[in-house]
Image (cartoon, helix red, strand yellow):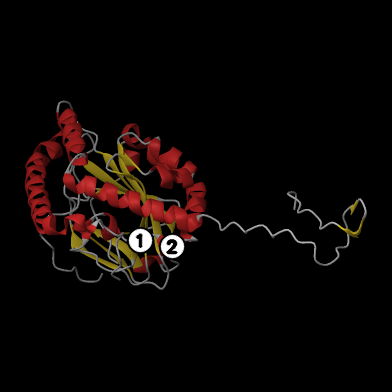
């Protein structure tokens, strides 16, 4: 296995484990308040740092109250009462793949992860990790969900689902060693589009190395250090989800409160705004171009059509809606 990159100790994203990408241009921002930008940036960074410290303190309670154990990689079959939804997704992976393929027809208009959540920049700063969000920490991306109704229906059926999006890694992409911010959620990957050289497209979680398979899921705790490689010449695409960890009461209530507060935090709200801008951009780009109707003309004969009263020239044929 390839050696691990040095761990980056900067506060991680509330969205959990990211994946690397060539630098892109974010949606245009309002320049009316440029003088206050340094202050806002500093406040943002302080909020992220303080929030991360709080999340780390809560983690101890969460790990001890887990109903499914505390390990790097989870086997859903060991806890069917909590993870029956994984089988439902895997049985329906082909409809999800079809909706992914339709999205990928417009991949050049997809945002990078750091375009949505800027705190990912410490692990990805290129164009090799694309995203298509359906949900982000409980916030629904309405336009994107409308484009993928079957996938949306399936992810909405998952108990405690907080985040769901298509994650697309370009050939050669490497995501350096990092960890997620909070043990109160578990990470799930459903393989949708996997390179033929599966062994060269892999994820390491703690000391375990796994490969994606189309139609198969991977459930893990992203607070364990992990790293991703796509050492192939094909892209890899998955359905990426975060779900609430099953916990004993009253820690389960504490966990729901923490997750709700994170969803209201500045970094999630900022990501929500970015996502809405990118979703609008994508919708406009993916909208089929409507051909302008031909201007009416009387020049030149046609081969069919009724004759006009007193006019020896036939009328131009009407376009049919049936063809």
| Crowd around label 2: few <14 · some 14–19 · many ≥20 (10 Å) | some
Residue drawn at point x = 20 percent, y = 56 percent: 32
Q: Quadrant of the N terminus?
A: bottom left
Using residue 64 as the reference point, say whether residue 151 is left or right of it.
right
Q: Position of residue 54 (x, y in %)?
A: 7, 43
Residue drawn at point x = 43 percent, y = 62 percent: 107
Marker count (numbered)? 2
Circle 1 sits on which residue?
A: 130
Q: Earlier in the sequence, mark 1 or mark 2?
A: 2
- Helix, strand or loop under label 1: strand
Q: Position of residue 239 (x, y in %)?
A: 38, 51
Q: Position of residue 294 (x, y in %)?
A: 69, 60
Q: Which label number is shown at residue 107? A: 2
Residue drawn at point x = 40 percent, y = 51 percent: 280
Q: Which picture quadrant has residue 193?
A: bottom left
Q: Is residue 301 above or below residue 53?
A: below
- Helix, strand or loop under label 2: helix
Q: Contact, CB < 8 Å: mark 1 with mark 2? A: yes
Instruction: Specify whether residue 143 is in view.
Output: yes
Using residue 176 as the reference point, say whether residue 316 is left or right of it.
right
Residue drawn at point x = 19 percent, y = 48 percent: 267
Nearer the observer, 320 or 292? 292
Using residue 314 as the reference point, say whether residue 152 is left or right of it.
left
Instruction: Specify whether residue 148 is in view.
Output: no
């Amino acid at each position: 296995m390839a050696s691990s990159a040095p761990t980056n100790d900067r506060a991680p994203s509330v969205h959990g484990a990211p994946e690397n990408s060539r630098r892109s241009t974010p949606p245009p921002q309002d320049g009316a308040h440029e003088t206050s930008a340094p202050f806002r940036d500093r406040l943002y960074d302080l909020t992220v740092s303080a929030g991360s410290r709080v999340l780390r303190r809560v983690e101890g309670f969460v790990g001890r109250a887990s109903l499914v154990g505390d390990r790097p990689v989870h086997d859903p079959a060991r806890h069917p009462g909590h993870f029956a939804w994984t089988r439902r997704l895997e049985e329906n992976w082909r409809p999800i793949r079809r909706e992914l393929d339709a999205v990928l027809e417009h991949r050049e208009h997809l945002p990078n992860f750091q375009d949505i959540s800027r705190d990912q920049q410490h692990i990805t700063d290129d164009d090799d990790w694309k995203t298509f969000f359906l949900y982000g920490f409980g916030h629904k991306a309405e336009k994107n969900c409308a484009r993928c109704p079957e996938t949306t229906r399936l992810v909405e059926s998952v108990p405690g689902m907080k985040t769901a999006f298509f994650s697309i890694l370009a050939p050669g992409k490497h995501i350096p060693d990092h960890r997620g911010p909070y043990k109160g959620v578990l990470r799930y990957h459903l393989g949708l589009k996997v390179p033929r050289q599966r062994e060269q497209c892999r994820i390491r979680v703690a000391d375990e190395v796994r490969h994606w398979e189309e139609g198969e899921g991977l459930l893990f705790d992203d607070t364990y250090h992990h790293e991703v490689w796509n050492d192939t010449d094909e892209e890899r695409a998955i359905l990426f989800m975060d779900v609430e960890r099953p916990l004993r009461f009253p820690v389960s209530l504490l966990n729901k409160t923490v997750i709700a507060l994170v969803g209201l935090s500045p970094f999630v709200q900022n990501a929500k705004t970015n996502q809405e801008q990118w979703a609008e951009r994508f919708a406009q780009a993916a909208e089929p171009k409507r051909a302008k109707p031909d201007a009416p003309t009387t020049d030149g004969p046609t081969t069919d059509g009724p004759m006009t009263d007193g006019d020896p020239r036939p009328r131009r044929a009407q376009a049919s809606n049936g063809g």
